[in-house]
Amino acid sequence: MSGNKLYEGKAKILFTTDDPHILLSRYKDDATAFNALKKGTITNKGEMNCAIASHIFQYLETQGIATHFIQQVSPNEMQVAAVKILPIEVVVRNIAAGSICKRLGLQQGQALKIPLVEFFYKNDDLGDPLITDAHVAMLDLATPEQVVQLKELALNINQHLQTFFDRCNLILVDFKVEIGVDRKGQLLLADEISPDTCRLWDKAIADPTERIMDKDRFRQDLGNVAEAYQEVMKRVLSS
Ligand code: C5P
């Protein structure tokens, strides 16, 4: 049962519920890339990402990571804690791919010596620019204590996700998380963890295009997008 639409994003809609501390997050089939310059739909993506994210949130909770997840209430809907999302997209990279290759001239597929945490300013009008800790402070996006906590949390999540996806025979190349602050001031992992927000490569496939199991198939028009999501879901749900 949902109340009023609170916010509609590119991949999800948030609704109020009878309880002011609980929101309903409805996952959509819509897919966008390049700051919504490319638009499309992926068949059943809403249900697949909702199932994948629910499973991963529950796994992370068992590993001591606090998340906004409460429960899955329908194939494409979950109840989540009402939080204030920090306007920072936190990206963790284990292997060079995507924007860091363009920005720094790194070779696609090059392993990074240690995981890298990057902050991007969550602002569609500006195209989500890369920002430093100094920008976070200057723009008042988070406190210095929260910046330290964000980095620790992101690296901690990375360790658990690497272990988890390894069991799925998938390599976690990189991912993006969004973090919310609950009414007690605690940081909670929010938004979603799915093939929309992670780069995942099939461990058993060497071909650099064939092994892609995430939204890069949509971004790069590689075909078999829904099939890749389906396969990720199958492996995630059986891990
Ligand atoms: O584009 P870039 O290489 O910076 O993306 C790094 C990671 O963050 C990728 O896994 C991508 O799917 C994810 N990402 C996201 N939402 C964005 C930007 C990036 O989920 N707005």
Image (tube, rainbow, N blue to C red):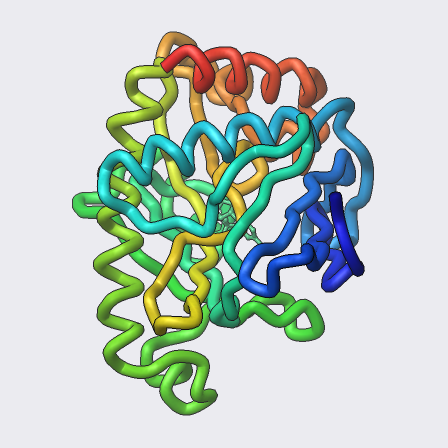
Q: Residue at left 45%, top 63%?
A: 180
Rendering coords of residue 196 (x, y %): 58, 38
Q: Residue at left 25%, top 66%?
A: 149
Q: Nearer the viewer, residue 125 or 99?
A: 125
Quadrant of residue 188 in the image? Answer: bottom left
Q: In which quarter of the image is the C terminus?
A: top left
Q: Is the residue 221 above or below the residue 134 in the image? A: above
Q: Nearer the viewer, residue 185 or 18?
A: 18
Q: Residue at left 53%, top 22%?
A: 213
Q: Quadrant of the N terminus?
A: top right
Q: Which of 166 and 115 is in front in this view?
A: 166
Q: Is the residue 165 above or below the residue 102 in the image? A: above
Q: Residue at left 30%, top 16%?
A: 167
Rendering coords of residue 58 (x, y %): 39, 33
Q: Is the residue 84 above or below the residue 230 in the image? A: below
Whether residue 181 is visible, yes or no, is: yes
Q: Which of 170 and 187 is in front in this view?
A: 187
Most extreme residue toward the left is: 113
Most extreme residue toward the bottom is: 138
- Whether residue 50 sits left or right of residue 177 in the image: it is right
Count of numbered circles on the image: 0
Whether residue 100 is visible, yes or no, is: no
- Whether residue 168 sits left or right of residue 43 in the image: it is left
Q: Is the residue 89 above or below the residue 214 in the image? A: below
Rendering coords of residue 38 (x, y %): 78, 46
